[in-house]
Image: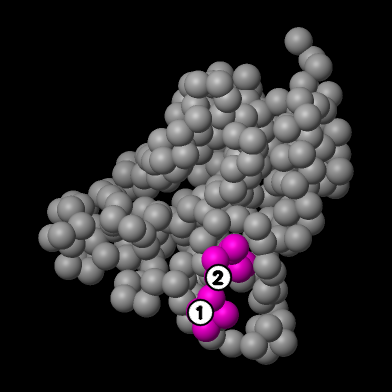
Amino acid sequence: MIRGFFLGRRPYLPVHELMQSLFEARQRGEVGDTVLLLEHDPVITLGRTAKRENLLAQPDALARLGVEVVETGRGGDVTLHAPGQLVAYPIVDLSPDRRDVRKYVQGLTAVMASLVEPHGLSTGTISGKIGMWVDAESPGHWPGEEAARMPVKLGAIGVRISRWVTQHGFALNLTTDLALFQWIVPCGIREFGVASLEQMTGTRLAVRDAAELAFPAIAARLDRAAGPLVDASEWPLDRVLEAARLLAVTP
């Protein structure tokens, strides 16, 4: 069974520390498969292959605007998290039967697609550019990457997998302030822009409501049974780690 915790809105670094602790505990078998779902305070994160030229402002200038800059161990380049964006961090063991990185990333993409399709968005992928895309010229119909006239990125993916245990995950723009993306070249992609569900459809889907839908969808993609999504939005984060350990030994 996979367990889920909704953390509400949190700053990046404390959640990253929790994710790392859960990741190490999962490798040791001290916790079971766990998913953290939340939204972050404004933060720019630099992946392992990030190019500094894709950060378009100095960190001290961004700090004055209330935007953190953090280096992280996920894959990928520069990205941004902000309120109104659903972030999912699955910490799961892909062994023994899910050891396929491509399939795992495709599954995360499909989860994001399942959240926006009921609101009239048709999404797709672009070769060599991980994430989920929509054609701003025809948001209700994805014509394929060759025919798309104005591809914009709706959801980003950046993962790290070690000894087949996963961390990091996806970020889906629901009602995110897209003006914040002016400070970066998102994922190092200069030729295409970014979008949100609200921008494309006018729909204001709350992060909490999206998390309730995303958690069972993630579990289904991993062929795991889903327990309840625990509302931990008012918890101190160390309590989440304690609860994950307790649930690992609870029948």
Task: Give the mark count.
Answer: 2
Q: Mark 2: give few (<14), some (14-19) or many (20+) Cα within 10 Å.
A: some
Q: Quadrant of the C terminus?
A: top right
Identify the mark at residue 50; answer none if there is no mark: 2
The amino acid on which the numbered mark 1 sits, given as a three-letter code, is Asn
Judge whether residue 151 is colored magenta.
no
In this view, 179 is above or below 150: below
Q: Is residue 129 left or right of residue 173?
A: left
The answer to whether residue 106 shows anywhere in this view is: yes
Give coordinates of residue 203: x percent, y percent.
39, 56
Picture coordinates of residue 27, whole percent (x, y)? 73, 32
Q: Report the residue at 68% width, 50% height from top.
A: 8
Q: Amino acid at mark 2?
A: Ala
Q: Would you say 123 lies left or right of 49 here?
A: left
Q: Which mark is residue 247?
A: none
Which residue is painted at 33% across and 42% down in the image? 118
Q: CA distance from mark 1 to mark 2?
A: 8 Å
Q: Position of residue 92 (x, y in %)?
A: 62, 33
Check disc 1: other Cα within 10 Å, few if <14, some if 14-19, many if 20+: some
Q: Which residue is mark 1?
A: 54
Whether label 1 touches label 2, CB < 8 Å: yes
Numbered range of the magenta stretch: 45-54
User: Where is the N terminus found, in terms of image quarters?
Assistant: top right
Residue at image coords 41%, 40%: 102
In this rendering, position of residue 250 left or right of residue 213:
right
Query: Could you say where residue 169 lies in the image, as x and y percent from the top left?
Result: 55, 48
Question: Position of 12 compared to 57: left or right?
Answer: right
Disc 2 is placed on an element classified as loop
